[in-house]
């Protein structure tokens, strides 16, 4: 084998080692927080994050039935939030919906943990009113970053956990984009519904959009996603328009 060929193989080998090293480093960085948790309390951390995920799924279902709200707005009919009323748009911003989902998490997460009764070997304290959640709606998922001080004792050892995270697969971002388009079309012609527009939006985004008359002047819209299921069910997002 010629010297040039040997040198080439050496360079390739070095590049492979560097690439593998970089991959290992980035993976360690991604899970660095987990590695920093004492092994004895990792099951508690995992339990809390599992609860965040399941509570997050419940939150999406709940706010979906109420037009993106945990605390209902003033403009509504029964539990359906108005997005169009008196020729004006009342579509909440994405940030408002994120905050409403966070409110659900803050309120309901402690119920999921059940005061940590499954961890009988530990003394665990966590203020149920001190949950603070940041919810972020992304393209194909929703992330939950939760701050909650959890104090843990076992015999002479004391630990604390205070930062948790979980993701839930969801096309809420696409749902919101569709409703934005619907609202823009509605503002162009406040007196009628553009059926062809709804059909086009439904096909483009792989949604099903249903309309139902609710009283003399209200239409309830339900956007259904059967592509990404939540709790093994089609996801529904419901709101109302008044004409």
Image (cartoon, helix red, strand yellow):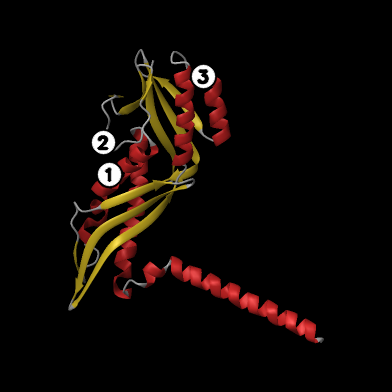
- Whole-angstrom CA distance, mark 3 to mark 1, is 34 Å
**Figure check: 9 above or below 200:** below
Left or right: residue 211 versus residue 106 is: right
Indicate the position of residue 116 as horizontal and vertical percent values.
23, 61
Residue depicted at 55% across the width and 26% down the height: 199
Residue depicted at 35% across the width and 36% down the height: 68
Q: Which residue is mark 1?
A: 103
Q: Residues within 10 Å of mark 1 (few under 14, many from 20)?
A: many
**Mark nearer the N terminus (1 vs 2):** 2
Check residue 194 in the rendering and tell me which mark sits there, or answer none.
Answer: 3
**Which element type, helix, strand or loop, lies under badge 3?**
loop
In this orientation, which residue lies closer to the viewer: 180 or 220? Answer: 180
**Mark nearer the N terminus (3 vs 1):** 1
Q: Quadrant of the C terminus?
A: top left
Q: Residues within 10 Å of mark 2 (few under 14, many from 20)?
A: few
Left or right: residue 225 versus residue 76 is: right
**Which element type, helix, strand or loop, lies under badge 1?**
helix
Q: Quadrant of the N terminus?
A: bottom right
Residue 69 appears anywhere in the view: yes
**Mark nearer the N terminus (3 vs 2):** 2
**Which element type, helix, strand or loop, lies under badge 2?**
loop
Q: Quadrant of residue 119?
A: bottom left
Q: Residue furthest right?
A: 2
Indicate the position of residue 134 as horizontal and vertical percent values.
33, 50
Residue depicted at 44% across the width and 20% down the height: 187
**Figure check: 199 above or below 65:** above
- Whole-angstrom CA distance, mark 3 to mark 2, is 30 Å
- Dots 1, 2 in contact, CB < 8 A: yes
Q: Which residue is mark 2?
A: 71
- Whole-angstrom CA distance, mark 1 to mark 2, is 8 Å
Indicate the position of residue 86 as horizontal and vertical percent values.
35, 16
């Amino acid at each position: 084998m010629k010297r040039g060929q040997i040198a080439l193989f050496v360079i390739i080998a070095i590049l492979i080692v560097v690439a593998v090293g970089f991959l290992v480093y980035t993976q360690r960085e991604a899970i660095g927080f987990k590695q920093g948790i004492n092994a004895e309390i990792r099951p508690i951390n995992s339990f809390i994050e599992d609860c965040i995920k399941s509570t997050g799924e419940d939150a999406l279902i709940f706010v979906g039935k109420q037009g993106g709200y945990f605390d209902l707005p003033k403009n509504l009919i029964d539990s359906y939030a108005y997005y169009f009323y008196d020729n004006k748009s009342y579509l909440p911003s994405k940030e408002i919906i994120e905050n409403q989902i966070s409110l659900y998490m803050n309120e309901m997460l402690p119920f999921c943990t059940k005061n940590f009764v499954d961890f009988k070997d530990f003394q665990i304290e966590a203020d149920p009113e001190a949950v603070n959640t940041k919810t972020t709606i992304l393209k194909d998922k929703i992330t939950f970053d939760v701050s909650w001080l959890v104090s843990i004792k076992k015999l002479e050892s004391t630990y604390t956990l205070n930062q948790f995270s979980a993701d839930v697969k969801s096309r809420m971002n696409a749902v919101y984009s569709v409703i934005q388009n619907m609202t823009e079309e509605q503002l162009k012609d406040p007196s009628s519904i553009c059926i062809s527009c709804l059909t086009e939006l439904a096909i483009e985004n792989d949604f099903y959009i249903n309309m139902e008359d609710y009283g003399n002047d209200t239409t309830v819209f339900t956007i259904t996603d059967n592509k990404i299921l939540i709790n093994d069910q089609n996801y529904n997002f419901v709101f109302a328009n008044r004409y």
